[in-house]
Amino acid sequence: LNRARETLIMKIEALYSTRTFTLTYVVWDESTGDAVVIDPVLDYSPVGSKTFVESVDRVSELIKSNDLRVHYVLETHAHADHLSGSQILKRRHESKVAIGEHITEVQETFRDIFDLPNLATDGSQFDKLVKAGEIFSAGSLSIEVIATPGHTPACVTYKIEDALFTGD
């Protein structure tokens, strides 16, 4: 093992959204402050069709209070059941957004179903399209991508150390 791997102290915080009944995870190396956020939710109320940033604010507060450096916001899949807070966190924390490479298939389906002829279907809305079996770094964190299609063809599970993170 290299020295960085020997000193990794992984912390995981699960934040539950009562509005959407979903979990957002913040995973970080306590010794370096390197972090990722998994499946952040943008709160939504169908009454009045309003969005709220309560859950995103909770994530940002956790990031700030632990002096974390967010390298990636990781999406496990396209969320049809809730809205994603990834773009807000990307702007707030100067991070990148990653999702499974098969998001392009989901975008093609959404384009047709929702009659969105101008929707780009090349995944360009994301900074990184990850592939099954790929291992990439977020600072001192090593993240393995495991394809878990089902809910959508773009579903992936992220393995960080001995923890697996999957959506829905």
Image: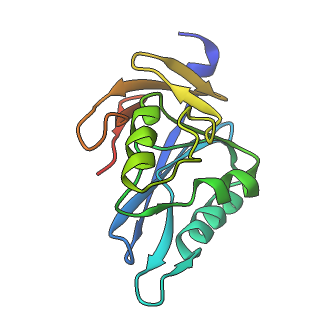
Q: Position of residue 39 (x, y in %)?
A: 46, 51
Considering every residue shown, the one lying at the far bottom of the view is 48
Q: Determine which quarter of the picture holds residue 2.
A: top right
Q: Position of residue 20 (x, y in %)?
A: 37, 71
Residue 109 percent across, percent down from the top left: 37, 42
Q: Single out the residue that lies furthest toward the left.
A: 150
Q: How many numbered discs sit on the rendered protein?
A: 0
Give me the residue at 42% from left, 25% from top: 145
Compared to 136, does 69 lie above or below?
A: below
The residue furthest top is: 1
Q: Residue at x 42, y 29 (%)?
A: 102
| Visual colour scheme | rainbow
In front here: 38 or 152? 152
Q: Is residue 100 left or right of residue 167?
A: right
Work out whether residue 6 can be spotted. Answer: no
Q: In the shown orientation, is residue 136 left or right of residue 155?
A: right
Above or below 60: residue 49: below
Q: Position of residue 9 (x, y in %)?
A: 54, 36
Image check: 167 left or right of 5?
left
Q: Judge left or right: residue 146 versus residue 129.
A: left
Residue 168 in the image: above or below residue 141 = below
Observer-nearest residue: 140 or 97? 97
* Residue nearest the observer in this picture, 46 or 118: 118
Taking the spot 34% from the left edge, 47% from the top edge, the residue there is: 167
Instruction: Say which residue appears at 43% left-offset and 39% top-offset.
Output: 108
Q: Is residue 61 visible?
A: yes
